[in-house]
Each structure stands twice: as structure tokens, then as C-alpha cells.
Image (cartoon, rainbow, N blue to C red):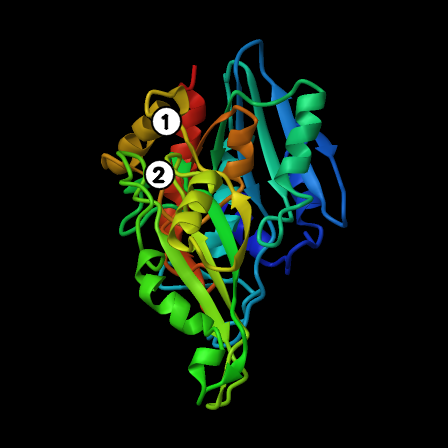
Amino acid sequence: MNSIDLLLKLLSYESLTPDDKGSLHFIEEYLPDFEATYVNEGGVKNLFLSKKFSEGEHLCFAGHVDVVPAGDGWNTPPFVPTIKEGNIYGRGTQDMKSGVAAFVQACKEAEGFKGRLSILLTSDEEGEATYGTQIMLAHLKKIALLPDYCVVAEPTCEEVFGDAIKVGRRGSINGYMTLQGRQGHAAYPAKAINPIHQIAPILKDISGINLDDGDKDFAPSQMVVTDMRAGMEVTNVTPNSLKLMFNVRNSTKTTQDEVKLHIDKTFKGLDYSLKLTQGSYPFVTSRDSKIVKKLSLAIKEVTKIETKYSTAGGTSDARFIAQFGIDVVEFGVINDTIHAPNEHTSIDEVEKLTCTFKSVIKDFN
């Protein structure tokens, strides 16, 4: 079996979050030389496969086998992998069973590695991720098996295979505001406090503004208003309150405290409440890290492309890995049909991804 056969097999599992549908057990059996450890909580299975070749550094490949629901609009059955004109169609082809197939095959064929080689897999990445990768990492820390370096095989390429790796991710701060007014008759505005009128002149100071200037790793942290509502959908009653939600994909230069200070300054003198939550925290792996250099060299060897370093996009389980002090990068196939109908990737990309991971393993020491 090669990485293409392996991908076709993985795609046939209807592994909707958080059910792996038996795919993790299949991978365990596919790598009989690796010691398997399961940590299962909250109805989620997490699998850690590890093989010690010798004393040395610990390199881990990480990913998820769960996928989002198929939805409508497919031209082929989403859980019956179909090959057409050099492309493989099926839910999870890009996000991220192609990556899993590539690093599982690379690890299976690994020879002469010095140190420990491992694989961390979860079935709880596309959901809340409460019982997924971070649960397994906590267990690995307890038994002193945390990796030194990690590659997460999320789809990272933009236009052509090999053009981008993720060396970090922005954080995500969610804001929930209530601006209090006083309901009244629209004909007597002086007897009411209209929160819509209050927010109108200052909306420009929160919607789409940058909270920092960014840097070589991150774009500016921008405040994006995602929802605003007030009133009872009638024309003659002013609202009693206004509710507003926003999101900040923050770099390492902006924190919750700085978001709060900006809101306090902007809404000074108004009656409001603010709640902030942090969905994820920003991180960046040094360009001088061994894993960044080794992966970049492997990509160039396979594709002849000088890859760029990116922190764009949403979140991934790399955010949990970084919090444990592990140097982590992400690299996978082109990202252009994830979560969409007719999700697909090419045979060529999967084969090149497998070769890239094999090169990282071969030359790591």
C-alpha cells in the first residue's frame, strides 16, 4: 500500500466529529512497529503512535481524522473516494486526510532515524477541540514524552504545492457588548436614550480598525464587528439596549487587556458591559528553528520552490502544541476546497507531500 491507497482507505471512513469510525484503529494496525497509546475523554479518541529508533530528539507528526459534514452539492458520493482526471474527490481530501496519509506512510517507510518518531492523531479538531490534541499533550507531558518538534499536516499551500508553510497562527479574541439605553417613543426622543444614536458616531472607531501595526510575522490585529442588533422591529419605539459582537484575530502584539482598554476609551461615559473570551492564543515559531529549516529544505528538494512563511488563516491544533513549548510548523496540500462541496486534492500533491515528509525524516539528524 502506498500513500494514495492509504488516503483512499481513510476517505472511506465517514468520520464526522468526534467519531473516528474505526480509522484510528486501522492506522494503529498499519504501523505495527509503533507503540500505541490511546487517551479517550468526552467520547473522543486520541491516538499516539511512537517508535524509538535511538537516543536523540523527538519528532512528531500531528493531525486529525475527523471531518465536517458533507453538505449538499456534491457530484460524487462524499464518502466514496473518486478519482477523476488526476484528482481525488471526497470529504477530508484536503482537510486533512491527505496530510495524515502522507505522514503515516512516511513514518512507515522511515529508516535510520536517530531519536524518537511519533504520530499524534485526534478525532476532535473540527468541533470544540476540548477533548482532542490538548488532552493527549497533557498526558504526554505527564509521562515525559512531549516532542521536541512537530509538523501538523494541515493544508497550507495557496496557489501551487510547496508555496507556503505556517510558522504561526493568530489568536482569536471574541467580544460581547451590551450598550444600555432607555426605551421610549420615537416621537419624543428627548425622553429616551437611544443606544443606536449613541454608537453611531463612534462605530468608526471600532469597526475594521487596526489595534497594532503588525510585524514581519503577523498582519495587524483588526477589530471586526460581526453582529449588531437592537429594537423590536417597529418604527415608533426606540430600543432599550443594543447588543454587539466582534472578533479580533490578534497577533502577539495585542492582548485582551489592550482590546479592553480600547473599548473603555471609545465608550467612555456610556453605560455598557463587555465580555471578552479567548478562543485561541497567538504563537510563532522562530525561522531559525530546526524544524522550520529542515521542512523548508525538504520542500525545495521536492518542488524546487522557495517556500514562504505564513501566519494567515484561522486556527488549528498547532495552537495547543505551541503552548507546550514545542516548536511547531504546518505544511500540507493546497487549501482551496476545504469544507466545500466536491472537496478534492491531486494525486501529484499527495505524492509530493509524502516525499517531503520522508525527506524531513531522512535528513533530520
Q: Residue at x 42, y 72 (%)?
A: 196
| Mark 2 touches mark 1? (CB < 8 Å) | yes
Tag 1: amino acid: Val
In this view, which residue lies farthest toward the top?
Answer: 55
Tag 2's secondary structure? Answer: strand
Distance CA(mark 2)–CA(mark 1)? 9 Å
In the displayed structure, 47 sits above or below 334; it is above
- Give residue 343's quadrant in the image: bottom left
Of the pair 142 and 106, the residue shown nearer to us:
142
Q: Quadrant of the N terminus?
A: top right
Q: Quadrant of the C terminus?
A: top left
- Give residue 41's quadrant in the image: top right
Q: Is residue 46 left or right of residue 227?
A: right
* Mark drawn on residue 292: 1
Tag 1's secondary structure? Answer: helix
Q: Is residue 227 left or right of residue 22?
A: left
Q: Residue at x 73, y 31 (%)?
A: 37
Residue 5 visible to an observer of this rendering: no
Q: Residue at x 48, y 55 (%)?
A: 93
Instruction: Locate residue 309, reporting x and y percent.
Output: 30, 36
Instruction: Locate residue 250, reporting x and y percent.
Output: 40, 43
Q: Earlier in the sequence, mark 2 or mark 1?
A: 2
Q: Residue at x 27, y 36 (%)?
A: 307
In the displayed structure, 97 sits above or below 365; it is below
Instruction: Locate residue 186, reporting x and y percent.
Output: 45, 87
Disc 2 residue crowd, few under 14, some 14–19, many 20+, Cα 10 Å: many
Of the pair 46 and 14, the residue shown nearer to us:
46
Residue 13 visible to an observer of this rendering: yes
* Mark drawn on residue 165: 2
Instruction: Locate residue 40, reporting x and y percent.
Output: 76, 41
